[in-house]
Amino acid sequence: MFIDEAVILVRSGKGGDGFVHFHREKYVSRGGPDGGDGGRGGDVILEVVATLNTLGSFRHNAKYAAKDGVKGGVNNMTGRSAEDLVIPVPPGTIVYDHDSGELLGDLVEPGQRLMVAKGGRGGRGNTHFVSSRNQAPRTAEKGEPEQEHTLRLELKLIADVGIVGVPNAGKSSLLAAVTNARPKIANYPFTTLEPNLGVAELEIDRQLVLADIPGLIEGAHMGVGLGDSFLRHIQRTRVLIHLLDGLSEDPLADFSQINSELALFDANLASKPQLVALNKMDLPDVAARWPEIQQELEKRGYQAMAISAVTHANLQELLWRAAKLVAETPAPEPVVSLPVYRPQEDPRDFTIERESDGGWRIRGASIERAAAMTYWEFEGSVRRFQRLMDTLGVDAALRQAGAQQGDTVYIADFELEYQE
């Protein structure tokens, strides 16, 4: 099944905790601190794999989590860092933050990577907190918390040429005739329910990638019929082959309608080079009306061709014309991928809210991360957190908001007692 949209949850690995430990050795009564650092948590990375052409793998698995870093050990041993979690995606995948709608990256080239969740750094062991005043610190850091994001993946097929037209115009027959693709073909509308890709061999070293787009009807840009979900697959193409149904009551009206739908969906689609071809010329009735249709199209500024997908008449000429237009038309530039998701706001910012029980809720990226990395059972770590509260201005803000001695202060999942 062709899947071109997916929503997935990604979570990076948490950093390993730093270790509090003192060197122990026979005949050494007061060994110094030797607690090691924690290992780094794994990143979550999307990587383009050329052999993929659908997002179907995300249909049954929508949650991806990298492994956590390992806790530090004795004798200054650093915990093992976790391996990155690499998720394969097809070329043409666009990545959005599902909650904010922010564009994170446009993945086009095979091997291209996008980090979507950064692993937490390992916490520092107590060897890092030695000072002239404190030679035996019982202070360490827990590992940095993981990042978690909900992503929306959208696939836009990458093809040189997109074949468009009304239902039953013969798009799938044309694709099958000029490539090795085997799309479903039948004599009724909406035979094609998903885009099909095929590669046409013009010469030994010259190929043309074509995409057969399901038939478009009036209102397609608003989701009518098969909807606008297929229109985006021709946004990356350089050239369009606009196939007219020779048996239609009014092929010229069909031509105008499809162009209107393209322009309403994306103004850039209307400006793409088009090759117009009237199909089913093997039928006498179609051949008889061709001169009139050709004359009208040329009046509108289009060079039209007459072809037959059944007898293969003029198909090679159509492909060579398309190849010439592709060579003359620059490829659309993809959006530059961002190296990693980053929040827009300043992580040092925070807010203070009054809870229904009279306590105070503090929200902010830096303060919540610091709380998660604090060993609350060690007095030195608690004092370090208090100094950070003062540095960020949280203490002053609580006093200004009216916090009193003994009030409960909530930071993420932690409950603290406010003291002057």
Image (cartoon, rainbow, N blue to C red):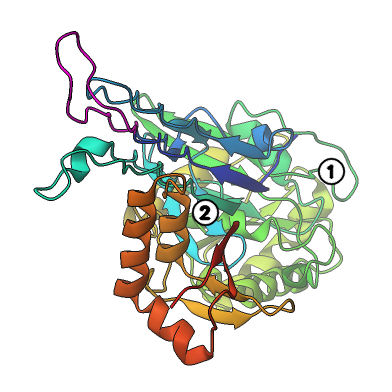
Please say if the residues under marks 2 and 1 sit with CB atoms less than 8 Å apart.
Answer: no
Q: Quadrant of residue 294?
A: bottom right
The structure residue drawn at horizontal position 85% and vertical position 49%, both measured from the top left corner, is 190
Observer able to see residue 321: no
Above or below, 378 against 274 in this view is above
The structure residue drawn at horizontal position 58% and vertical position 34%, both measured from the top left corner, is 198
Please check the rendered image and state whether residue 123 is part of the magenta-colored stretch, yes or no: no
Numbered-mark total = 2
Q: Quadrant of the N terminus?
A: top right
Residue at the far top in the pictured view = 26
Q: Report the span colored magenta.
A: 19-39
Nearest the eye: 83 or 360: 360
Above or below, 182 against 192 in this view is above
Q: Disc 1 designates what residue?
A: 191
Q: Which label sits in the foreground, 2 or 1?
A: 2
**Amino acid at circle 1:** Thr
Residue at the far left in the pictured view = 132
Q: Of helix, strand and loop, which one carries label 2?
A: strand
Badge 2 local density, few (<14 within 10 Å), some, or many (20+)?
many
Q: Quadrant of the C terminus?
A: bottom left
Residue 60 lies left or right of residue 38; in this view the side is right
**Amino acid at circle 2:** Val
Q: Disc 2 designates what residue?
A: 95
- Relative image position of residue 107 (x, y in whole percent): 43, 47
